[in-house]
């Protein structure tokens, strides 16, 4: 699906747009199936090693990992795209329907940024029932859930300074329903016009810092895609549903512009000028991530040096 002129105008005016029904079941099914198979395989391994009491194979996709995570967070911690490196996820990063949407805002020369995540947002009331020290288990579960409630932030906060001038488009999509109850996104529109980055609380920001901030809650259905400017503040609501809210958040930009994570692999996901430049080789993508993470583990990646204490205008090109 291509963005209509009205959708592009909405993005330019509001700093985001939700493209409804932009993806079909056939676009998302391979990714969901690959995640399900990965979890199935790893659950079998952990059971065989005596680290999980059973595989919870009877549970549906949006509950199975939550049940497993009551006992061990090991599989949950492997769910990010660069950790489990599913071939279907790599294919989805250059999915034609997705690239058609992105092309409406980036143009036809598209780079897939390494700032890309698969998220299994766990239910907030998950209780530890695993082996080992119950206090330590409870502490780890609570810390993990606290981490996966995304606080208010702008994506411009998470790349290095070299990408400040780059227009970087965030693409967020649920793999099932995303509702206020299970952790859908909220955005504050129109902030991108001011070019301001609200650094003062580190990663998070307080919406009260933003004059006239209006919070918009964005329930989304499977197949809907949210496109967002990197200066648009957003967060996700707590997950009170007892089920997992699965989603992908990806970033795209013009080929040749800095991603702000040059130590991790970017790749060309569409090029009409040079179609041969598109990376379609899964082993190469997977190997590049493996090598990059061995050099720079995720928890040791360089962070911005310059983090002012006050909201700061940023020289960011819009589009
Ligand atoms: O998926 C979420 O809960 C948060 C996503 C997010 O903050 C992002 O994509 O930048």
Image: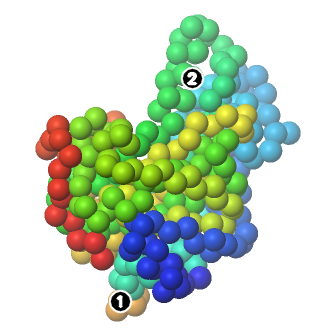
Q: Position of residue 18 (x, y in %)?
A: 55, 67
**Farthest-out residue, right:** 58
Q: Position of residue 90 (x, y in %)?
A: 52, 64
The structure residue drawn at horizontal position 47% and vertical position 32%, both measured from the top left corner, is 147
Visible residue check, residue 294? no
Of 38 and 5, nearer the camera is 5
Left or right of residue 147: residue 314: left
* SS category of the residue bearing label 1: loop
Of 60 and 46, nearer the camera is 60
Mark before the other along the chain sequence, 1 or 2: 2
Dot 2 corresponds to which residue?
Answer: 141
Of 175 and 311, nearer the camera is 311
Q: Using the image, tell me which numbered label, if any, was put on residue 274.
A: 1
Visible residue check, residue 5? yes
Q: Quadrant of the N terminus?
A: bottom right
Left or right of residue 12: residue 38: right
Quarter-of-image position of residue 243: top right
**Farthest-out residue, bottom:** 273
Alpha-carbon span between mark 1 and mark 2: 47 Å
**Farthest-out residue, front:** 212
Quarter-of-image position of residue 47: top right
Of 270 and 4, nearer the camera is 4
The structure residue drawn at horizontal position 58% and vertical position 36%, both measured from the top left corner, is 238
How crowded pointer 1 is (Cα within 10 Å; few <14, some 14-19, many 20+) is rated as: few
| Of the two numbered discs 1 and 2 in the rendering, the one whose residue sits closer to the viewer | 2
**Does 74 sit above or below residue 270?**
above
Q: Position of residue 46 (x, y in %)?
A: 67, 30
């Amino acid at each position: 699906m291509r963005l209509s002129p009205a959708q592009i105008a909405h993005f330019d005016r509001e700093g985001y747009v939700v493209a409804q029904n932009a993806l079909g079941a056939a676009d998302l099914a391979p990714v969901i199936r690959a995640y399900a198979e990965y979890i199935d395989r790893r659950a079998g391994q952990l059971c065989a090693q005596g680290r999980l009491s059973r595989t919870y194979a009877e549970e549906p996709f949006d509950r199975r990992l939550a049940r497993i995570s009551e006992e061990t967070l090991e599989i949950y911690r492997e769910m990010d795209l660069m950790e489990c490196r599913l071939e279907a996820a790599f294919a989805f990063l250059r999915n034609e329907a997705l690239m058609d949407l992105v092309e409406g805002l980036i143009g036809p020369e598209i780079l897939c940024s390494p700032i890309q995540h698969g998220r299994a947002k766990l239910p907030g009331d998950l209780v530890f029932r695993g082996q080992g020290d119950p206090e330590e288990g409870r502490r780890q579960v609570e810390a993990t859930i606290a981490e996966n409630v995304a606080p208010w932030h702008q994506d411009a906060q998470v790349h290095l300074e070299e990408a400040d001038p780059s227009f970087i488009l965030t693409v967020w999509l649920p793999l099932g329903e995303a509702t206020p109850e299970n952790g859908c996104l909220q955005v504050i529109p129109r902030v991108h016009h001011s070019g301001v980055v609200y650094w003062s609380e580190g990663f998070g920001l307080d919406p009260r810092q933003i004059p006239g901030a209006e919070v918009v809650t964005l329930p989304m259905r499977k197949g809907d895609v949210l496109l967002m400017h990197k200066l648009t503040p957003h967060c996700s609501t707590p997950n009170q549903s007892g089920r997992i809210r699965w989603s992908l958040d990806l970033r795209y930009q013009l080929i040749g512009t800095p991603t702000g994570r040059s130590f991790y692999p970017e790749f060309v996901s569409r090029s009409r000028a040079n179609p041969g430049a598109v990376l379609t080789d899964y082993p190469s993508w997977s190997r590049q991530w493996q090598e990059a993470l061995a050099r720079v583990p995720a928890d040791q990646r360089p962070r911005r040096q310059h983090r002012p204490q006050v909201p700061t205008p940023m020289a960011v090109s819009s589009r």
